[in-house]
Image: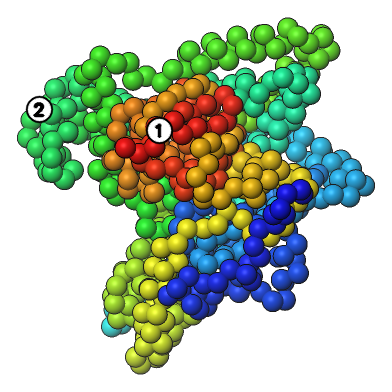
Amino acid sequence: MSGEVSRFPFFHEAPAPEGAEGWESMYPYYLLPREETRAWEDSILWFADTMHWSRGVHPFDSIGAEAVYLGAGQNSTRIFVLPTSLGLDVRVQNGYVYIAGIPVTDPAEIARRAALFQERAGFYYANWDELYAKWKTKVTEAVAGMKTISFPPLGELDPIEVVTEARGRSTSWDIIANYHRLIDEFFLVWQYHFEFLNLGYGGYIVFFQFCKQAFPQITEQEVARLVAGVDVLAFRPDDELRKLAQMAADLDLVGVLSGTGPAADKFSALAGSENGQVWLKAYQAAQNPWFNYFAEYGFTHDQDTWNSNPEIPLQGIVRYAARIQAGEDIARPVERLSRERDEIVAEYRNLLSPEEQAQFDELLGLARKVFPFIEEHNIYVEHWTHTVFWEKVWELGDFLVSVGFAAERDDVFYLNRFELDEALADIVQSWAIGVEIRGRKKWADIIARRRPIVAALQAHSAPPAYGIPPEEVTDPFAVMNYGVTTDRIKEWLGASSGSSSTLTGIPGGPGVVEGQVRVLRTERDLALLQPGEILVAAITAPSWAAAFSVATGVVTDIGGMMSHAAIVCREYGIPAVVGTGFATANLKTGQRVRVDGNAGTVTVLEDVR
């Protein structure tokens, strides 16, 4: 790679942030950069997965890094045998999750794997609809099973039924067994998660490559629009907000919903009128399952769902209702996008020979077939599964408090999953024997020491990458979801948090728009977004869709053509540039910029006044 800078810093060259010394003790050893694996770690590129973990992770929350990349790796490497890519290796560095694609470069090995992939992936492509229906059943059953897990308090004695039913075992063992069930179900669902995902990306990439070869002048944005305009389950929560906004306007309730005060007071006021009761009934009908929806990505325990924090959906409902009252049509432009998509398809198809048209039709059909899963899996796994999982871990935190092990219910998150297993064994064994918990002070001291360490880690942002870039990025997950391409890495190496007036990224949503920037650091900043502003964030979650109703453009640090941010922006017809790497560092709230979603550029027009 040419240029003055040919690599990023190595892990061992990055000191701990002040106050976070000793952070390594919080995580399982195999998630950490280590002396014995340094040669390997220094030889490849690691990029920050701030799409899913936007902040330094608590010890327990690192379980996600394990489960996610176990599922990704086994499906890519061992089950479907991707020809040019193995799994994604994972490390935690200064509290942030980093991943590295493992390429296959030997032509003979690629050919061998390609034959295996064709057989295995071909079976799924040929039976996609039937297998996808089975997938939904598997995940739904796993979530239902997770809901049955409980951690009841330990009383003085076991229930009399243990004797009268001759069970021969104490109910206290259920604490251990249920904890193991919870962990196992979480890992299982993440294996299901990747059963279809890379196949979905693969189907899209094959179509993308065909288009780039057949139409050398076609842009990435135009290829994406050939597939866009498809209605999927992922948009249902936002559709529920739109319906509730329309009902609020029809029932003359917008004033109550948009007033000051907490959501609980607004719900109480609504319950006092006939129209309000009608609206509340509709709201409650939408809650399960559609409001089991995280405001971010649901990968850490400290994120709100729409159900746990009703201020979030109410904010979206009020925004939509205000637009309705202003005479605007708030419906998603699905028909327009579908019509434009079909026109573009016809234009390009007419440029091909009959034989090429047949291949084009086949590949386009596959890309459209696999597209829904790329978005819908997020509802089943990241939202519905994670909602139940974190609820159960919080219940486990309550259990730790009830037995006198922990002082606060969130103490549970300062132990990693193996340490928590040890602590539960201590608790159950001590209770069974009739003695005090033997490690109470040990763990209390560890938790007290870790609280400021986690805070120090989260006070610092994650560098985009570590290590040595490959000659070419081949992992479909890295390319399509994260936007980590060969060109993007070159730009990262040549960029900094300096004052460049132009940022480049990946075209996420078509169109060009100018407006003032609003930099959002977390989902809690969404209320600050004003109509007409350009939303700038490290990444946007699917649940931010209501915010897109007031934003005129979107810019993100991370994300690829098939990231949720890009898909949502295309479906909503919003100009977007994703995967810029440094937007949140370079841009400031109040600046005026031009977002060119066709070219993938963001240009500063005016600085903050």
Answer left or right for 272 relative to 554.
left
Of the numbered discs 2 and 1, the one sitting upstream in the chain is: 2
Residue type, numbered disc 1? Glu
Q: Residues within 10 Å of mark 1 (few under 14, many from 20)?
A: some
Quadrant of res 449: bottom left
- Which percent across, then down, holds residue 112? 89, 46
> In this view of the protein, which residue sits in the foreground, 83 or 152?
83
| Above-or-below relation of 222 to 447 | above
Instruction: Say which amino acid is labelled 2.
Output: Glu
**Left or right of 312 on screen, residue 492:** right
Colour approach in the figure = rainbow
Q: CA distance from mark 2 to mark 1?
A: 51 Å
- In the image, farthest residue toward the right: 108
Residue named by callout 1: 606
Where residue 77 appears, as percent x and y from the top left, is 75, 52
Residue at image position (41%, 69%) is 456
Q: Mark 2, mark 1: which one is toward the viewer? A: 1
Classed neighbour count for the residue bearing mark 2: other residues with Cα under 10 Å, few (<14), some (14–19), many (≥20): few
SS assignment at label 2: helix
Q: Nearer the viewer, residue 457 or 210?
A: 457
Can residue 136 be seen here? The reply is no
Residue 118 in the image: above or below residue 274 = below
Which residue is labeled 2 in the image?
Answer: 274
Residue 537 can be seen, yes or no:
yes
Residue 280: image location, x then y, percent: 19, 34
